[in-house]
Image: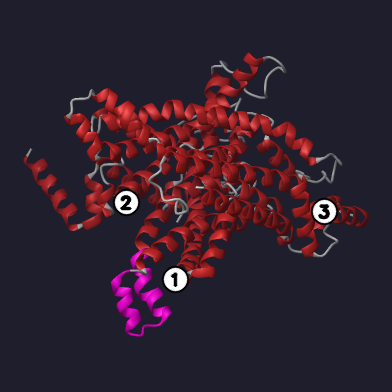
Amino acid sequence: MEFRARSTSRYQQLLDRLPVLGDVLRRPLGALGFLIVFLFLMLVVFAPLLAPYGFAAQDIPSMLQGPSRAHWLGTDHLGRDLLSRLIYGSRIALGVALPSVSAALFSGLTIGLIAGYAGGIIDDITLIILDSVQAFPAVILALAILALLGPSLTNVMLVIAITWTPGYARIARAQVLRTKQEPYIEVERSLGATRFRILFFHILPNIIAPLLILAAMDLPVVITFEAGLSFLGLGVRPPTPSWGVILSEGFNYIRQTPWPITWTGLTLIITTLGFTLFGETLRDVLDPTLSGTRGI
Amino acid sequence: MRNYLLKRLFMTLLVLVLVTIYLTLLVHIVPGDPAKSLLGPRANPERIARIRSAMNLDKPILQQIKISLVNLVRGDLGTDIFTGRRISMLIKSALPHTLILAWTSLSLAVILGIPLGVYSATHPDSWLDRFTAIISISFITVPSYVGGLFLLLIFAVNLQWMPAIGLGDKGNWLDYLQHLALPAVALAITWVGYLARLVRASLLEVLNQTYIRAEMAAGIPLRKIYYQYALKNALIPTVAVLGVGIGNLMAGAVFVELIFTRPGMGTLIYNAIQARNYPVVRAGVLVVAFLFVAANLLADILYTYLDPRIQLGKVRG
Protein backbone atom coordinates (compact mmCIF):
# COMPACT_ATOMS: atom_id res chain seq x y z
CA MET A 1 0.00 0.00 0.00
CA GLU A 2 2.82 2.30 1.02
CA PHE A 3 4.71 1.36 -2.12
CA ARG A 4 1.67 2.13 -4.23
CA ALA A 5 1.20 5.54 -2.63
CA ARG A 6 4.86 6.37 -3.13
CA SER A 7 4.92 5.19 -6.72
CA THR A 8 1.72 7.13 -7.46
CA SER A 9 3.22 10.29 -6.07
CA ARG A 10 6.43 9.70 -8.02
CA TYR A 11 4.34 9.26 -11.16
CA GLN A 12 2.48 12.47 -10.32
CA GLN A 13 5.79 14.26 -9.78
CA LEU A 14 7.02 13.01 -13.13
CA LEU A 15 3.83 14.24 -14.79
CA ASP A 16 4.22 17.64 -13.14
CA ARG A 17 7.71 17.91 -14.58
CA LEU A 18 6.44 17.35 -18.12
CA PRO A 19 4.30 20.40 -18.87
CA VAL A 20 2.40 19.29 -21.98
CA LEU A 21 2.98 15.53 -22.08
CA GLY A 22 2.07 15.33 -18.37
CA ASP A 23 -1.33 16.88 -19.09
CA VAL A 24 -1.85 14.43 -21.96
CA LEU A 25 -0.91 11.45 -19.77
CA ARG A 26 -3.31 12.53 -17.01
CA ARG A 27 -6.24 11.87 -19.37
CA PRO A 28 -6.92 8.15 -19.71
CA LEU A 29 -7.54 8.16 -23.46
CA GLY A 30 -4.54 10.44 -24.02
CA ALA A 31 -2.36 8.02 -22.02
CA LEU A 32 -3.71 5.11 -24.07
CA GLY A 33 -2.92 6.99 -27.28
CA PHE A 34 0.59 7.79 -26.07
CA LEU A 35 1.19 4.15 -25.15
CA ILE A 36 0.14 2.95 -28.61
CA VAL A 37 2.25 5.59 -30.38
CA PHE A 38 5.21 4.72 -28.14
CA LEU A 39 4.88 1.00 -28.87
CA PHE A 40 4.56 1.73 -32.60
CA LEU A 41 7.76 3.80 -32.52
CA MET A 42 9.52 1.00 -30.63
CA LEU A 43 8.50 -1.41 -33.41
CA VAL A 44 9.86 0.97 -36.02
CA VAL A 45 13.19 1.47 -34.26
CA PHE A 46 13.81 -2.09 -33.05
CA ALA A 47 12.15 -4.04 -35.89
CA PRO A 48 15.16 -6.30 -36.61
CA LEU A 49 15.48 -7.15 -32.91
CA LEU A 50 11.77 -7.71 -32.27
CA ALA A 51 10.84 -9.62 -35.44
CA PRO A 52 11.33 -13.37 -34.97
CA TYR A 53 12.10 -13.89 -38.69
CA GLY A 54 13.15 -11.81 -41.68
CA PHE A 55 10.23 -10.20 -43.52
CA ALA A 56 10.92 -12.28 -46.66
CA ALA A 57 12.02 -15.52 -44.94
CA GLN A 58 9.87 -18.38 -46.26
CA ASP A 59 8.75 -21.50 -44.44
CA ILE A 60 6.93 -23.21 -47.32
CA PRO A 61 5.66 -26.27 -45.37
CA SER A 62 3.89 -23.91 -42.93
CA MET A 63 2.17 -21.68 -45.47
CA LEU A 64 -1.33 -20.28 -44.82
CA GLN A 65 -1.27 -21.48 -41.19
CA GLY A 66 -3.00 -19.97 -38.18
CA PRO A 67 -1.25 -18.81 -35.01
CA SER A 68 1.20 -21.35 -33.58
CA ARG A 69 4.23 -21.43 -31.26
CA ALA A 70 6.59 -21.05 -34.20
CA HIS A 71 4.55 -18.31 -35.89
CA TRP A 72 2.58 -16.38 -33.28
CA LEU A 73 0.26 -14.67 -35.78
CA GLY A 74 0.40 -17.38 -38.45
CA THR A 75 1.88 -17.33 -41.95
CA ASP A 76 0.95 -16.05 -45.40
CA HIS A 77 0.66 -17.84 -48.77
CA LEU A 78 4.46 -18.07 -49.08
CA GLY A 79 4.95 -19.32 -45.52
CA ARG A 80 6.28 -15.95 -44.36
CA ASP A 81 5.82 -15.06 -40.69
CA LEU A 82 2.98 -12.53 -40.38
CA LEU A 83 4.22 -11.04 -37.10
CA SER A 84 7.63 -10.30 -38.62
CA ARG A 85 6.07 -8.78 -41.73
CA LEU A 86 3.76 -6.58 -39.66
CA ILE A 87 6.68 -5.42 -37.50
CA TYR A 88 8.79 -4.53 -40.54
CA GLY A 89 5.69 -3.02 -42.12
CA SER A 90 5.64 -0.37 -39.38
CA ARG A 91 8.91 0.94 -40.88
CA ILE A 92 7.32 1.28 -44.31
CA ALA A 93 4.25 2.96 -42.78
CA LEU A 94 6.25 5.62 -40.94
CA GLY A 95 8.94 5.72 -43.62
CA VAL A 96 6.34 6.84 -46.17
CA ALA A 97 4.15 8.95 -43.88
CA LEU A 98 6.85 11.04 -42.21
CA PRO A 99 8.71 12.32 -45.30
CA SER A 100 5.55 12.88 -47.31
CA VAL A 101 3.73 14.76 -44.54
CA SER A 102 6.90 16.80 -43.89
CA ALA A 103 7.15 17.67 -47.59
CA ALA A 104 3.45 18.63 -47.70
CA LEU A 105 3.85 20.71 -44.52
CA PHE A 106 6.90 22.50 -45.92
CA SER A 107 5.33 23.32 -49.26
CA GLY A 108 1.94 24.16 -47.74
CA LEU A 109 3.57 26.44 -45.18
CA THR A 110 5.60 28.23 -47.85
CA ILE A 111 2.55 28.76 -50.09
CA GLY A 112 0.38 29.83 -47.14
CA LEU A 113 2.97 32.27 -45.84
CA ILE A 114 3.48 33.94 -49.21
CA ALA A 115 -0.23 34.08 -50.15
CA GLY A 116 -1.40 35.24 -46.73
CA TYR A 117 1.25 37.91 -46.35
CA ALA A 118 1.20 39.19 -49.93
CA GLY A 119 -2.60 39.37 -50.10
CA GLY A 120 -4.34 40.89 -53.15
CA ILE A 121 -4.19 39.14 -56.49
CA ILE A 122 -1.47 36.67 -55.40
CA ASP A 123 -3.71 35.52 -52.57
CA ASP A 124 -6.75 35.26 -54.85
CA ILE A 125 -4.91 33.21 -57.49
CA THR A 126 -3.38 30.94 -54.84
CA LEU A 127 -6.82 30.34 -53.32
CA ILE A 128 -8.33 29.38 -56.66
CA ILE A 129 -5.46 26.98 -57.40
CA LEU A 130 -5.75 25.42 -53.93
CA ASP A 131 -9.52 25.11 -54.40
CA SER A 132 -9.05 23.40 -57.74
CA VAL A 133 -6.55 20.87 -56.37
CA GLN A 134 -8.90 20.19 -53.46
CA ALA A 135 -11.72 19.60 -55.93
CA PHE A 136 -10.32 16.09 -56.31
CA PRO A 137 -11.05 13.69 -53.46
CA ALA A 138 -7.60 12.58 -52.21
CA VAL A 139 -7.82 8.96 -53.39
CA ILE A 140 -9.08 10.01 -56.81
CA LEU A 141 -6.26 12.53 -57.29
CA ALA A 142 -3.78 9.88 -56.24
CA LEU A 143 -5.26 7.41 -58.72
CA ALA A 144 -5.09 9.96 -61.55
CA ILE A 145 -1.39 10.64 -60.91
CA LEU A 146 -0.35 7.06 -60.15
CA ALA A 147 -2.14 5.85 -63.28
CA LEU A 148 0.51 7.76 -65.22
CA LEU A 149 3.56 7.57 -62.99
CA GLY A 150 3.13 3.91 -62.13
CA PRO A 151 3.33 2.32 -58.69
CA SER A 152 6.45 2.89 -56.58
CA LEU A 153 7.40 4.03 -53.09
CA THR A 154 8.69 7.41 -54.31
CA ASN A 155 5.62 8.06 -56.44
CA VAL A 156 3.33 7.32 -53.50
CA MET A 157 5.25 9.80 -51.35
CA LEU A 158 5.07 12.39 -54.13
CA VAL A 159 1.33 11.86 -54.53
CA ILE A 160 0.71 12.16 -50.78
CA ALA A 161 2.78 15.35 -50.61
CA ILE A 162 0.80 16.88 -53.51
CA THR A 163 -2.55 15.79 -52.06
CA TRP A 164 -1.88 17.12 -48.57
CA THR A 165 -0.20 20.43 -49.51
CA PRO A 166 -3.38 22.49 -50.16
CA GLY A 167 -4.79 21.66 -46.72
CA TYR A 168 -1.70 22.96 -44.93
CA ALA A 169 -1.45 25.95 -47.26
CA ARG A 170 -5.03 26.98 -46.47
CA ILE A 171 -4.54 26.75 -42.72
CA ALA A 172 -1.15 28.49 -42.85
CA ARG A 173 -2.69 31.26 -44.94
CA ALA A 174 -5.59 31.73 -42.51
CA GLN A 175 -3.17 31.87 -39.58
CA VAL A 176 -0.95 34.41 -41.37
CA LEU A 177 -3.98 36.60 -42.11
CA ARG A 178 -4.83 36.61 -38.42
CA THR A 179 -1.29 37.06 -37.15
CA LYS A 180 -0.27 39.84 -39.52
CA GLN A 181 -2.94 42.09 -37.99
CA GLU A 182 -1.38 41.79 -34.54
CA PRO A 183 0.05 45.02 -33.07
CA TYR A 184 3.55 43.55 -32.61
CA ILE A 185 3.79 42.88 -36.34
CA GLU A 186 2.73 46.46 -37.02
CA VAL A 187 5.45 47.62 -34.63
CA GLU A 188 8.06 45.47 -36.40
CA ARG A 189 6.99 46.86 -39.74
CA SER A 190 7.15 50.46 -38.51
CA LEU A 191 10.66 49.78 -37.20
CA GLY A 192 11.71 48.88 -40.72
CA ALA A 193 11.89 45.07 -40.47
CA THR A 194 12.13 43.36 -43.86
CA ARG A 195 9.30 41.15 -45.15
CA PHE A 196 11.57 38.13 -44.85
CA ARG A 197 12.31 38.93 -41.20
CA ILE A 198 8.64 39.51 -40.35
CA LEU A 199 7.54 36.33 -42.12
CA PHE A 200 10.17 33.92 -40.88
CA PHE A 201 11.12 35.35 -37.46
CA HIS A 202 7.80 36.71 -36.25
CA ILE A 203 4.87 35.16 -38.09
CA LEU A 204 6.24 31.64 -38.67
CA PRO A 205 7.01 30.85 -34.99
CA ASN A 206 3.48 31.94 -34.08
CA ILE A 207 1.67 29.78 -36.61
CA ILE A 208 3.81 26.67 -36.63
CA ALA A 209 2.41 24.98 -33.47
CA PRO A 210 -1.14 24.28 -34.70
CA LEU A 211 0.23 23.11 -38.05
CA LEU A 212 2.61 20.69 -36.37
CA ILE A 213 -0.25 19.23 -34.31
CA LEU A 214 -2.30 18.93 -37.47
CA ALA A 215 0.60 17.19 -39.23
CA ALA A 216 0.95 14.77 -36.31
CA MET A 217 -2.77 14.02 -36.55
CA ASP A 218 -2.43 13.50 -40.29
CA LEU A 219 0.23 10.80 -39.83
CA PRO A 220 -2.29 7.99 -39.21
CA VAL A 221 -4.47 9.22 -42.08
CA VAL A 222 -1.47 9.10 -44.39
CA ILE A 223 -0.50 5.66 -43.05
CA THR A 224 -3.95 4.28 -43.95
CA PHE A 225 -3.84 6.18 -47.25
CA GLU A 226 -0.53 4.57 -48.24
CA ALA A 227 -1.77 1.15 -47.12
CA GLY A 228 -4.92 1.70 -49.20
CA LEU A 229 -2.94 2.56 -52.34
CA SER A 230 -0.63 -0.41 -51.76
CA PHE A 231 -3.73 -2.58 -51.26
CA LEU A 232 -4.87 -1.50 -54.72
CA GLY A 233 -1.44 -2.44 -56.08
CA LEU A 234 -0.65 1.20 -56.84
CA GLY A 235 1.71 1.91 -53.96
CA VAL A 236 4.50 -0.11 -52.44
CA ARG A 237 5.16 -3.29 -54.44
CA PRO A 238 5.55 -6.83 -53.07
CA PRO A 239 7.58 -8.33 -51.47
CA THR A 240 8.09 -5.11 -49.43
CA PRO A 241 5.96 -5.72 -46.34
CA SER A 242 3.72 -2.65 -46.51
CA TRP A 243 0.58 -3.26 -44.49
CA GLY A 244 -1.42 -2.62 -47.66
CA VAL A 245 0.55 -5.29 -49.52
CA ILE A 246 -0.05 -7.82 -46.72
CA LEU A 247 -3.79 -6.98 -46.83
CA SER A 248 -3.88 -7.32 -50.60
CA GLU A 249 -2.14 -10.71 -50.51
CA GLY A 250 -4.46 -11.77 -47.67
CA PHE A 251 -7.47 -10.73 -49.77
CA ASN A 252 -6.36 -13.12 -52.52
CA TYR A 253 -6.38 -15.99 -50.01
CA ILE A 254 -9.40 -14.84 -47.96
CA ARG A 255 -11.17 -18.22 -48.34
CA GLN A 256 -8.11 -20.18 -47.17
CA THR A 257 -6.99 -18.12 -44.16
CA PRO A 258 -8.50 -15.17 -42.29
CA TRP A 259 -5.31 -14.28 -40.39
CA PRO A 260 -3.38 -11.92 -42.72
CA ILE A 261 -6.47 -9.69 -43.06
CA THR A 262 -7.43 -9.93 -39.39
CA TRP A 263 -4.02 -9.01 -37.94
CA THR A 264 -3.16 -6.37 -40.51
CA GLY A 265 -6.60 -4.75 -40.21
CA LEU A 266 -6.32 -4.68 -36.43
CA THR A 267 -2.79 -3.27 -36.61
CA LEU A 268 -3.97 -0.47 -38.89
CA ILE A 269 -6.97 0.31 -36.66
CA ILE A 270 -4.96 0.28 -33.41
CA THR A 271 -2.17 2.43 -34.86
CA THR A 272 -4.64 4.98 -36.21
CA LEU A 273 -6.57 4.94 -32.94
CA GLY A 274 -3.36 5.57 -30.96
CA PHE A 275 -2.26 8.52 -33.07
CA THR A 276 -5.78 9.97 -33.11
CA LEU A 277 -6.28 9.72 -29.34
CA PHE A 278 -2.83 11.16 -28.68
CA GLY A 279 -3.22 13.94 -31.25
CA GLU A 280 -6.71 14.95 -30.12
CA THR A 281 -5.70 15.01 -26.45
CA LEU A 282 -2.61 17.04 -27.33
CA ARG A 283 -4.78 19.52 -29.18
CA ASP A 284 -7.19 19.76 -26.24
CA VAL A 285 -4.31 20.34 -23.84
CA LEU A 286 -2.73 23.02 -26.03
CA ASP A 287 -6.04 24.68 -26.87
CA PRO A 288 -8.15 24.65 -23.68
CA THR A 289 -11.02 26.47 -25.42
CA LEU A 290 -11.82 23.20 -27.18
CA SER A 291 -11.61 20.97 -24.12
CA GLY A 292 -14.85 19.41 -22.98
CA THR A 293 -16.24 19.45 -26.47
CA ARG A 294 -14.22 16.54 -27.74
CA GLY A 295 -15.27 13.80 -25.40
CA ILE A 296 -11.77 12.94 -24.19
CA MET B 1 -27.84 36.38 -51.39
CA ARG B 2 -28.00 36.54 -55.20
CA ASN B 3 -24.55 38.15 -55.42
CA TYR B 4 -23.11 35.51 -53.16
CA LEU B 5 -24.65 32.73 -55.22
CA LEU B 6 -23.38 34.21 -58.47
CA LYS B 7 -19.88 34.62 -57.03
CA ARG B 8 -19.91 31.09 -55.66
CA LEU B 9 -21.15 29.70 -58.99
CA PHE B 10 -18.49 31.61 -60.89
CA MET B 11 -15.77 30.26 -58.55
CA THR B 12 -17.10 26.73 -58.99
CA LEU B 13 -17.00 27.05 -62.78
CA LEU B 14 -13.46 28.41 -62.59
CA VAL B 15 -12.42 25.46 -60.43
CA LEU B 16 -13.99 23.03 -62.89
CA VAL B 17 -12.15 24.66 -65.80
CA LEU B 18 -8.87 24.37 -63.87
CA VAL B 19 -9.60 20.73 -63.00
CA THR B 20 -10.12 20.00 -66.72
CA ILE B 21 -6.88 21.78 -67.61
CA TYR B 22 -4.93 19.81 -64.97
CA LEU B 23 -6.27 16.52 -66.27
CA THR B 24 -5.35 17.50 -69.82
CA LEU B 25 -1.84 18.46 -68.78
CA LEU B 26 -1.35 15.55 -66.39
CA VAL B 27 -0.59 13.15 -69.21
CA HIS B 28 2.55 15.18 -69.93
CA ILE B 29 4.09 14.47 -66.51
CA VAL B 30 5.15 11.05 -67.80
CA PRO B 31 8.78 11.26 -68.85
CA GLY B 32 9.18 10.61 -72.57
CA ASP B 33 6.33 10.01 -75.01
CA PRO B 34 3.02 9.64 -73.09
CA ALA B 35 1.49 7.47 -75.85
CA LYS B 36 4.45 5.11 -75.71
CA SER B 37 4.27 4.89 -71.92
CA LEU B 38 0.52 4.28 -72.00
CA LEU B 39 0.85 1.48 -74.54
CA GLY B 40 3.74 -0.14 -72.67
CA PRO B 41 4.74 -3.45 -74.27
CA ARG B 42 1.95 -3.07 -76.88
CA ALA B 43 3.74 -0.05 -78.40
CA ASN B 44 4.54 -0.02 -82.11
CA PRO B 45 4.88 3.06 -84.36
CA GLU B 46 1.43 2.62 -85.89
CA ARG B 47 -0.33 2.24 -82.54
CA ILE B 48 1.64 5.12 -81.04
CA ALA B 49 0.55 7.38 -83.89
CA ARG B 50 -3.08 6.27 -83.48
CA ILE B 51 -3.05 6.95 -79.72
CA ARG B 52 -1.33 10.30 -80.17
CA SER B 53 -4.01 11.32 -82.61
CA ALA B 54 -6.91 9.89 -80.54
CA MET B 55 -5.72 11.71 -77.42
CA ASN B 56 -4.87 14.88 -79.39
CA LEU B 57 -1.28 14.56 -78.22
CA ASP B 58 -0.10 15.47 -81.71
CA LYS B 59 -1.51 18.97 -81.29
CA PRO B 60 0.06 21.93 -79.44
CA ILE B 61 -0.65 21.94 -75.68
CA LEU B 62 -2.82 25.08 -75.84
CA GLN B 63 -4.98 23.48 -78.49
CA GLN B 64 -5.26 20.32 -76.39
CA ILE B 65 -6.59 22.44 -73.51
CA LYS B 66 -9.01 24.21 -75.86
CA ILE B 67 -10.33 20.91 -77.21
CA SER B 68 -10.80 19.56 -73.66
CA LEU B 69 -12.75 22.64 -72.61
CA VAL B 70 -14.95 22.60 -75.72
CA ASN B 71 -15.63 18.89 -75.20
CA LEU B 72 -16.45 19.61 -71.57
CA VAL B 73 -19.08 22.18 -72.56
CA ARG B 74 -20.52 19.68 -75.05
CA GLY B 75 -20.57 16.99 -72.38
CA ASP B 76 -18.28 14.86 -74.58
CA LEU B 77 -15.98 12.72 -72.47
CA GLY B 78 -14.13 11.23 -75.42
CA THR B 79 -13.65 7.73 -76.75
CA ASP B 80 -12.09 4.70 -75.17
CA ILE B 81 -8.87 4.42 -77.19
CA PHE B 82 -8.72 0.65 -76.89
CA THR B 83 -12.33 -0.38 -77.55
CA GLY B 84 -13.61 2.65 -79.45
CA ARG B 85 -16.68 2.95 -77.17
CA ARG B 86 -17.99 6.32 -76.00
CA ILE B 87 -16.67 6.91 -72.48
CA SER B 88 -19.91 8.65 -71.52
CA MET B 89 -21.70 5.32 -72.05
CA LEU B 90 -19.25 3.54 -69.74
CA ILE B 91 -19.82 6.20 -67.09
CA LYS B 92 -23.57 6.14 -67.57
CA SER B 93 -23.63 2.46 -66.70
CA ALA B 94 -21.19 2.75 -63.74
CA LEU B 95 -22.19 5.99 -62.03
CA PRO B 96 -25.68 5.05 -60.73
CA HIS B 97 -24.26 2.09 -58.77
CA THR B 98 -21.66 4.30 -57.07
CA LEU B 99 -24.22 7.01 -56.33
CA ILE B 100 -26.62 4.47 -54.80
CA LEU B 101 -23.77 3.04 -52.69
CA ALA B 102 -22.56 6.47 -51.52
CA TRP B 103 -26.10 7.69 -50.80
CA THR B 104 -27.05 4.55 -48.83
CA SER B 105 -23.85 4.83 -46.79
CA LEU B 106 -24.46 8.48 -46.04
CA SER B 107 -28.04 7.75 -44.96
CA LEU B 108 -26.80 4.96 -42.70
CA ALA B 109 -24.19 7.28 -41.20
CA VAL B 110 -26.84 9.94 -40.52
CA ILE B 111 -29.33 7.47 -39.02
CA LEU B 112 -26.74 5.95 -36.66
CA GLY B 113 -24.29 8.82 -36.11
CA ILE B 114 -26.67 11.61 -35.14
CA PRO B 115 -28.52 9.76 -32.31
CA LEU B 116 -25.14 8.56 -31.00
CA GLY B 117 -23.86 12.14 -30.93
CA VAL B 118 -27.05 13.47 -29.32
CA TYR B 119 -26.88 10.83 -26.58
CA SER B 120 -23.24 11.67 -25.87
CA ALA B 121 -23.87 15.41 -25.70
CA THR B 122 -26.91 15.10 -23.46
CA HIS B 123 -25.08 12.79 -21.05
CA PRO B 124 -21.65 14.47 -20.96
CA ASP B 125 -18.89 12.75 -18.98
CA SER B 126 -21.09 9.77 -18.13
CA TRP B 127 -19.46 6.37 -18.66
CA LEU B 128 -21.73 5.84 -21.63
CA ASP B 129 -20.50 9.12 -23.12
CA ARG B 130 -16.92 7.93 -22.77
CA PHE B 131 -17.85 4.54 -24.18
CA THR B 132 -19.55 6.27 -27.13
CA ALA B 133 -16.44 8.43 -27.56
CA ILE B 134 -14.26 5.32 -27.83
CA ILE B 135 -16.73 3.68 -30.22
CA SER B 136 -16.94 6.80 -32.40
CA ILE B 137 -13.17 7.32 -32.50
CA SER B 138 -12.62 3.63 -33.23
CA PHE B 139 -15.14 3.86 -36.07
CA ILE B 140 -13.38 6.93 -37.47
CA THR B 141 -10.12 5.02 -37.49
CA VAL B 142 -11.47 2.09 -39.54
CA PRO B 143 -10.48 2.69 -43.18
CA SER B 144 -13.23 1.66 -45.62
CA TYR B 145 -11.09 -1.13 -47.10
CA VAL B 146 -10.38 -2.66 -43.67
CA GLY B 147 -14.08 -2.40 -42.74
CA GLY B 148 -14.99 -3.96 -46.09
CA LEU B 149 -12.51 -6.83 -45.71
CA PHE B 150 -13.65 -7.55 -42.14
CA LEU B 151 -17.32 -7.56 -43.14
CA LEU B 152 -16.57 -9.78 -46.13
CA LEU B 153 -14.58 -12.15 -43.96
CA ILE B 154 -17.19 -12.38 -41.19
CA PHE B 155 -20.55 -12.22 -42.97
CA ALA B 156 -19.79 -13.56 -46.43
CA VAL B 157 -16.91 -16.02 -46.00
CA ASN B 158 -17.34 -17.36 -42.45
CA LEU B 159 -21.04 -17.04 -41.60
CA GLN B 160 -22.20 -16.97 -45.23
CA TRP B 161 -25.17 -14.82 -44.26
CA MET B 162 -24.68 -12.27 -47.00
CA PRO B 163 -23.68 -12.47 -50.66
CA ALA B 164 -20.02 -11.66 -51.22
CA ILE B 165 -19.76 -10.25 -54.71
CA GLY B 166 -21.59 -8.47 -57.48
CA LEU B 167 -24.87 -6.56 -57.71
CA GLY B 168 -27.34 -9.41 -57.52
CA ASP B 169 -29.95 -10.58 -60.04
CA LYS B 170 -31.09 -7.94 -62.48
CA GLY B 171 -34.58 -6.72 -61.64
CA ASN B 172 -34.66 -8.41 -58.22
CA TRP B 173 -34.65 -5.49 -55.77
CA LEU B 174 -34.38 -7.60 -52.66
CA ASP B 175 -31.31 -9.30 -54.04
CA TYR B 176 -29.87 -5.90 -55.02
CA LEU B 177 -30.37 -4.60 -51.46
CA GLN B 178 -28.78 -7.72 -50.01
CA HIS B 179 -25.73 -7.16 -52.20
CA LEU B 180 -25.70 -3.49 -51.21
CA ALA B 181 -25.79 -4.07 -47.44
CA LEU B 182 -22.17 -5.03 -46.69
CA PRO B 183 -20.52 -2.48 -49.02
CA ALA B 184 -22.77 0.29 -47.67
CA VAL B 185 -21.98 -0.57 -44.03
CA ALA B 186 -18.24 -0.78 -44.82
CA LEU B 187 -18.33 2.67 -46.33
CA ALA B 188 -20.55 4.14 -43.59
CA ILE B 189 -18.53 2.99 -40.53
CA THR B 190 -16.06 5.90 -40.57
CA TRP B 191 -18.83 8.43 -41.08
CA VAL B 192 -20.96 7.08 -38.24
CA GLY B 193 -18.09 7.85 -35.87
CA TYR B 194 -17.32 11.16 -37.49
CA LEU B 195 -20.91 12.43 -37.43
CA ALA B 196 -21.38 11.27 -33.83
CA ARG B 197 -18.34 13.30 -32.74
CA LEU B 198 -19.35 16.31 -34.78
CA VAL B 199 -22.94 16.36 -33.50
CA ARG B 200 -21.73 15.88 -29.94
CA ALA B 201 -19.31 18.82 -30.17
CA SER B 202 -21.76 21.20 -31.84
CA LEU B 203 -24.67 20.19 -29.60
CA LEU B 204 -22.54 20.76 -26.49
CA GLU B 205 -21.71 24.21 -27.82
CA VAL B 206 -25.38 25.01 -28.47
CA LEU B 207 -26.45 23.66 -25.07
CA ASN B 208 -24.12 26.20 -23.42
CA GLN B 209 -25.88 29.15 -25.04
CA THR B 210 -28.02 31.55 -23.07
CA TYR B 211 -31.27 30.86 -24.88
CA ILE B 212 -31.07 27.19 -23.94
CA ARG B 213 -30.41 28.10 -20.31
CA ALA B 214 -33.36 30.45 -20.42
CA GLU B 215 -35.54 27.63 -21.75
CA MET B 216 -34.29 25.34 -18.99
CA ALA B 217 -35.00 28.02 -16.38
CA ALA B 218 -38.52 28.39 -17.83
CA GLY B 219 -39.10 24.73 -17.04
CA ILE B 220 -39.49 23.50 -20.60
CA PRO B 221 -38.99 19.70 -20.62
CA LEU B 222 -35.39 18.75 -21.39
CA ARG B 223 -36.37 16.37 -24.16
CA LYS B 224 -38.19 19.18 -25.97
CA ILE B 225 -35.22 21.53 -25.52
CA TYR B 226 -32.74 18.95 -26.84
CA TYR B 227 -34.66 17.77 -29.85
CA GLN B 228 -36.83 20.73 -30.78
CA TYR B 229 -34.57 23.72 -30.10
CA ALA B 230 -30.94 22.70 -29.67
CA LEU B 231 -30.56 19.96 -32.28
CA LYS B 232 -31.87 22.16 -35.10
CA ASN B 233 -28.99 24.60 -34.61
CA ALA B 234 -26.45 21.92 -33.79
CA LEU B 235 -27.11 20.14 -37.07
CA ILE B 236 -26.16 23.14 -39.22
CA PRO B 237 -22.38 22.37 -39.25
CA THR B 238 -23.28 18.79 -40.12
CA VAL B 239 -24.86 19.96 -43.38
CA ALA B 240 -21.56 21.54 -44.44
CA VAL B 241 -19.73 18.32 -43.65
CA LEU B 242 -22.19 16.14 -45.57
CA GLY B 243 -21.20 17.95 -48.78
CA VAL B 244 -17.61 16.86 -48.28
CA GLY B 245 -18.95 13.51 -47.11
CA ILE B 246 -20.63 12.52 -50.34
CA GLY B 247 -17.41 13.24 -52.27
CA ASN B 248 -15.26 11.29 -49.83
CA LEU B 249 -17.71 8.42 -49.87
CA MET B 250 -17.44 8.28 -53.66
CA ALA B 251 -13.66 8.12 -53.32
CA GLY B 252 -13.90 5.44 -50.61
CA ALA B 253 -16.19 3.51 -52.94
CA VAL B 254 -13.12 2.66 -55.06
CA PHE B 255 -11.95 0.25 -52.37
CA VAL B 256 -15.33 -1.10 -51.41
CA GLU B 257 -16.37 -1.74 -55.02
CA LEU B 258 -13.17 -3.67 -55.65
CA ILE B 259 -13.49 -5.75 -52.48
CA PHE B 260 -17.10 -6.65 -53.21
CA THR B 261 -16.55 -6.81 -57.00
CA ARG B 262 -19.31 -4.24 -57.61
CA PRO B 263 -19.47 -2.32 -60.85
CA GLY B 264 -19.18 1.44 -60.34
CA MET B 265 -16.92 4.43 -60.83
CA GLY B 266 -14.21 2.95 -58.59
CA THR B 267 -14.06 -0.30 -60.51
CA LEU B 268 -14.19 1.59 -63.82
CA ILE B 269 -11.24 3.84 -62.88
CA TYR B 270 -9.26 0.98 -61.33
CA ASN B 271 -9.68 -1.32 -64.33
CA ALA B 272 -8.76 1.55 -66.65
CA ILE B 273 -5.57 2.13 -64.61
CA GLN B 274 -4.67 -1.55 -64.86
CA ALA B 275 -5.21 -1.42 -68.64
CA ARG B 276 -3.28 1.92 -68.83
CA ASN B 277 -6.38 3.32 -70.48
CA TYR B 278 -5.76 6.93 -69.54
CA PRO B 279 -8.68 8.58 -71.37
CA VAL B 280 -11.11 6.49 -69.29
CA VAL B 281 -9.16 7.27 -66.08
CA ARG B 282 -9.25 10.96 -66.96
CA ALA B 283 -12.97 10.98 -67.68
CA GLY B 284 -13.76 8.97 -64.53
CA VAL B 285 -11.67 11.26 -62.34
CA LEU B 286 -13.24 14.31 -63.98
CA VAL B 287 -16.78 13.09 -63.27
CA VAL B 288 -15.99 12.28 -59.61
CA ALA B 289 -14.29 15.67 -59.15
CA PHE B 290 -17.31 17.43 -60.72
CA LEU B 291 -19.72 15.63 -58.41
CA PHE B 292 -17.50 16.44 -55.43
CA VAL B 293 -17.46 20.14 -56.34
CA ALA B 294 -21.21 20.17 -56.99
CA ALA B 295 -21.96 18.48 -53.64
CA ASN B 296 -19.78 21.04 -51.86
CA LEU B 297 -21.51 23.89 -53.63
CA LEU B 298 -24.94 22.57 -52.69
CA ALA B 299 -23.92 22.06 -49.07
CA ASP B 300 -22.46 25.57 -48.94
CA ILE B 301 -25.65 27.13 -50.29
CA LEU B 302 -27.81 25.09 -47.96
CA TYR B 303 -25.55 26.02 -45.05
CA THR B 304 -25.88 29.74 -45.79
CA TYR B 305 -29.64 29.37 -46.19
CA LEU B 306 -30.03 27.48 -42.91
CA ASP B 307 -27.90 29.82 -40.84
CA PRO B 308 -28.68 33.47 -41.60
CA ARG B 309 -26.03 34.53 -39.06
CA ILE B 310 -23.32 33.63 -41.57
CA GLN B 311 -22.17 36.70 -43.43
CA LEU B 312 -22.79 36.02 -47.10
CA GLY B 313 -19.64 35.70 -49.11
CA LYS B 314 -17.46 35.24 -46.08
CA VAL B 315 -18.22 31.61 -45.42
CA ARG B 316 -14.89 30.36 -46.66
CA GLY B 317 -11.67 31.72 -45.35
Q: What amino acid is labelled 3 in the image?
A: Met
In this view, the residue farthest toward the front is B2
Is the C-beta separation of discs 2 and 1 under 8 Å? no
Pick whichever of labels 2 and 1 is earlier in the sequence: 1
Q: Quadrant of the C terminus of chain A?
A: top left
Q: What amino acid is labelled 1 in the image?
A: Tyr
* Helix, strand or loop at mark 2: helix
- Disc 3 from disc 1: Cα separation: 41 Å
Residue B131 in sight: no
Residue B120: which disc?
none
Q: How many marks?
A: 3
Dot 3, crowdedness within 10 Å: few (<14), some or many (≥20)?
many
Camera-side residue of B49 and B304? B304
Residue B193 as seen in the image, left or right of residue B203: right
Camera-side residue of B112 and A93? B112
Residue B272 as seen in the image, left or right of residue A27: right
Residue labelled with disc 1: A117
Q: Quadrant of the N terminus of chain A?
A: top left
State which region is magenta.
Answer: A182-207
Q: Quadrant of residue B261?
A: top right
Q: Is label 2 or label 1 in front?
A: 1
Camera-side residue of A50 and A234? A234
